[in-house]
Amino acid sequence: MPRVSQDHLDARRRQILDGSRSCFARYGYEGATVRRLEEATGLSRGAIFHHFKDKESLFLALAEDDATRMADVVAEQGLVQVMRNLLDASSSPALGADWLGTRLEVSRRLRTDEEFRQRWAQRSEQLTAATRARLQRQAEAGNLRDDIDIDVLTAYLELVLEGLLSHLAMGLPAQHLRPVLDLVEESVRRHRHC
Amino acid sequence: MPRVSQDHLDARRRQILDGSRSCFARYGYEGATVRRLEEATGLSRGAIFHHFKDKESLFLALAEDDATRMADVVAEQGLVQVMRNLLDASSSPALGADWLGTRLEVSRRLRTDEEFRQRWAQRSEQLTAATRARLQRQAEAGNLRDDIDIDVLTAYLELVLEGLLSHLAMGLPAQHLRPVLDLVEESVRRHRHC
């Protein structure tokens, strides 16, 4: 019997993550039953839970995967672009609301579950580091205002992101927030008109 | 037997609201049992539920009362000052975290309970109206930037407030957000250095 290769394991893991992402997006965390996860991934529960200890581990792996993608977009286009993408996702019927509901579930558990909080802290540090690094590069390119510390600007952008996530998670209308994001972006930039 | 006067009813209602506010603040919504509400208000459950149909009605009345106070502070000092007050409350052991946890509970129910959503919408409109009116006065006094619509500035400040509430509700450290609030305030003001 041939040994299962690392490439095969990685591909299988990716298949599970991608399938379960759409399942969580469609049904939310509670509604994403094992049966639905089987349908969405095309794999048996045995195969799924060979790779992930339980549904929570799968969900956390997905959150970490999303954080890595988010950090990649931040590195290339900045945190404000991540927020614009979230607005786009929220107005698309296939995405958005359910995922954001899950995100709010995460917020609640942060208050009560110390282990979860620590795992989530790593995820949040990844995004903070990517945001700070992006701002640092913008500063070096002369695009950033230089009268405010980069840590303050980083915390500012993250606070707006938290507001946006909370707003979307509540299912509130959000399209009027586009010019708000323009204002946020402008307020960290060097003011060329001065 | 003398008729109970309206003044007496109002005073009793105020006594219940003030007592239960500290009770909800200390124990959170779930932990604020009827027995604890009795202790905190110094009144029997019969007296309390003569004025409020049930615990939820009491809680909503409290939220509406808080919204009115918030709107009063907004009218006099602006929404950024409300946010600074929230930061102060969060660093005081007697206040803050539990109340904010209750606030997050509210956020969750907004997603699932249509009637609750409508009642909350009124509360949120009150704050929006107070914020917009305050910005309008600041604009007339020449203190506000005039290149961005007041509705956009209002939505901007409210989005930051949502972020702050979410941040505090998660129990995350917040003292580094003071200079962030300064930046927020500055970014809606007229730039005098130009």
Image: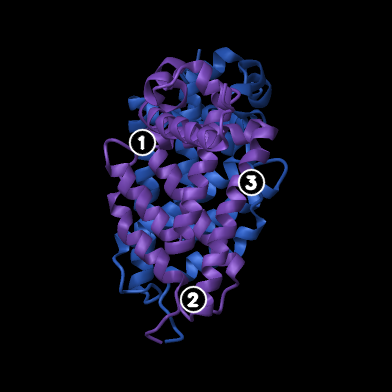
Chain colours: A purple, B blue
Nearest the eye: A66 or B153:
A66
Q: Is A131 situated above or below A105?
A: below
Mark 2 or mark 1, which has the lower sequence index? 1
Nearest the eye: B180 or A102:
A102
Cα separation between marks 1 and 3: 24 Å
Cα separation between marks 3 and 2: 27 Å
* Residue at the disc numbered 2: A144
Determine the image quadrant of residue A33: top left
Residue A36: percent from left, percent from top: 40, 19
Q: Amino acid at mark 2?
A: Leu
Nearest the eye: A160 or A30:
A30
The disc label shown at residue A97, or none: 1
Drawn side of residue A44 relative to residue B97, left or right: left
Q: Are marks 3 and 2 on the same chain?
A: yes
For label 3, the crowd category at 10 Å Cα-Cα, with few meaning under 14, some 14 to 19 and many 20 or more, is few
Mark 1 or mark 3, which has the lower sequence index? 1
Q: Quadrant of the C terminus of chain B?
A: bottom left
Residue B71: percent from left, percent from top: 44, 50
Q: Are marks 2 and 1 on the same chain?
A: yes
Q: Is residue B2 visible?
A: no
Secondary structure under the numbered disc 3 in the rendered image: helix
Q: Amino acid at mark 3?
A: Gln
